[in-house]
Amino acid sequence: MQAPFGRAEIETILPHREPFLLIDEVVEFEPGKRVVARRLVREDEWYFPGHFPGRPVMPGVLIVEAMAQTGAVAVLAQEENRGKIAYFAGIDDCRFKRIVEPGDELELTCEIDRIRGPIGRGRAEARVGGELAARATLTFAVER
């Protein structure tokens, strides 16, 4: 598979589905190494009515989840991991630098640092218009 590709192809790699599939398109793709994805944050997102009424803000945990799904594309696209699930095993050095709101387009990057057996780690960032919104080091465990 070659980038760019959209949701139909993403769904062949990830087990996530609406309303919890948080990436719309993959624009750069190196299986097992690096993925860059995008997410358009729409006004009708399911979480905005409650987060926050009158001041919609994308929850930080969902930004982290979008970064993790981006990394999961890199890991689960590898032949030995096809059809499996990658679970969170840790989130380190997570920082939020900018509010994400309706109309923003997240550019999500995850670079896989290492994979040893079923455990791996990646450095992830979320940016809006080139400005850092969030970053974290994500540890994952691929089901056996």
Image (tube, rainbow, N blue to C red):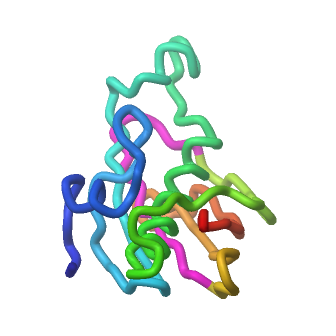
Q: Is residue 51 above or below residue 125?
A: above
Residue at point 21%, 79% (across, down): 1
For the residue pair 34 and 134, the one nearer the viewer reads as 34
Residue 135 lies within the magenta run: no
Number of labels in the image equals: 0
The boundaries of the magenta stretch are 99-112
**With 118 as the anchor, is 26 left or right in this view?**
left
Give the quarter of the figure containing the C terminus.
Answer: bottom right
**With 103 as the anchor, is 32 left or right in this view?**
right
Give the quadrant of residue 5: bottom left
Q: In x, y percent, where is residue 39?
A: 35, 51
For the residue pair 103 and 29, the one nearer the viewer reads as 29
Q: In x, y percent, where is residue 85?
A: 52, 58
Q: In x, y percent, where is residue 128?
A: 44, 57
Residue at point 32%, 46% (across, down): 40
Residue at point 45%, 80% (across, down): 80
Q: Is residue 25 above or below residue 109?
A: above
Q: In x, y percent, where is residue 83?
A: 40, 63
> Given the current orientation, which residue lies at the most extreme front position?
144
Residue at point 60%, 63% (across, down): 143
